Image (spheres, rainbow, N blue to C red):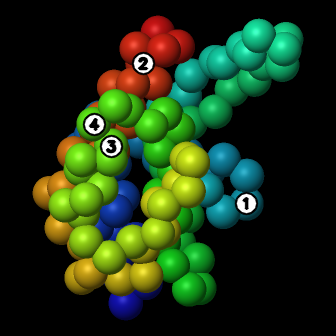
Amino acid sequence: RRREEAAVINALHRRVTGMEPKMWGPSIIGYGSYHYKYDSGREGDSCLTGFASRKAEIAIYLVARPPVADALLGKLGKHKSAKACLYIRRLADVDLKVLEQVVTASVAEVRKRYG
């Protein structure tokens, strides 16, 4: 089941970004990249969005939490949320159209912030 779900999430990310996946570390499948620089002087590169298929759940990396995120997450279905991640146990528990809107909004916010 997890492999099938990863294929669905991969297709969703490809549609949203129009980019091929790339490994970011040992477990994150990322799409695109951007360069960030904080006021503290810390800087680096990261993927625009991505996911990791873990034993217990799928982690979806939303680099920037867009203003519309809370409204969309209320419609998503069963999930857990952290500052920059969504955790989904089963794709059947969420609305995939809403998930695609969340990922799309996050990618747009990253591009807006880091151009």
On the image, numbered disc 2 is attached to which residue? 111
Q: Quadrant of the N terminus?
A: bottom left
Q: Amino acid at mark 4?
A: Val
On the image, numbered disc 1 is attached to which residue? 26
Q: Which sits earlier in the primary sequence, circle 3 or circle 2?
A: 3
Estimate the spatial distance between the alpha carbons at disc 3 and disc 2, rounded to whole Å: 16 Å
Give left or right: position of 28 versus 39: left
Q: Which sits earlier in the primary sequence, circle 3 or circle 1?
A: 1
Estimate the spatial distance between the alpha carbons at disc 4 and disc 3, rounded to whole Å: 4 Å
On the image, numbered disc 3 is attached to which residue? 69
Looking at the rendered structure, the secondary structure element under dot 2 is: helix
Q: At 34% across and 69% down in the image, what residue appears? A: 7
Q: Position of residue 79 (x, y in %)?
A: 39, 72
Q: At 19% across and 61% down in the image, what residue appears? A: 75
The quadrant where residue 20 appears: top left
Of 28 and 62, nearer the camera is 62
Query: Can residue 23 be seen here?
Result: yes
Estimate the spatial distance between the alpha carbons at disc 4 and disc 2, rounded to whole Å: 15 Å
Of 8 and 76, nearer the camera is 76
Looking at the rendered structure, the secondary structure element under dot 4 is: loop
Give left or right: position of 94 versus 62: left
Q: Amino acid at mark 3?
A: Ala
On the image, numbered disc 4 is attached to which residue? 68
Compared with 29, 111 (above or below) is above
Q: Which sits earlier in the primary sequence, circle 2 or circle 1?
A: 1
Q: Position of residue 41 (x, y in %)?
A: 85, 11
Looking at the rendered structure, the secondary structure element under dot 1 is: loop
Which of labels 4 and 2 is toward the front?
4
Disc 4 crowd, CA 10 A, few/some/many (<14, 14-19, 20+): few
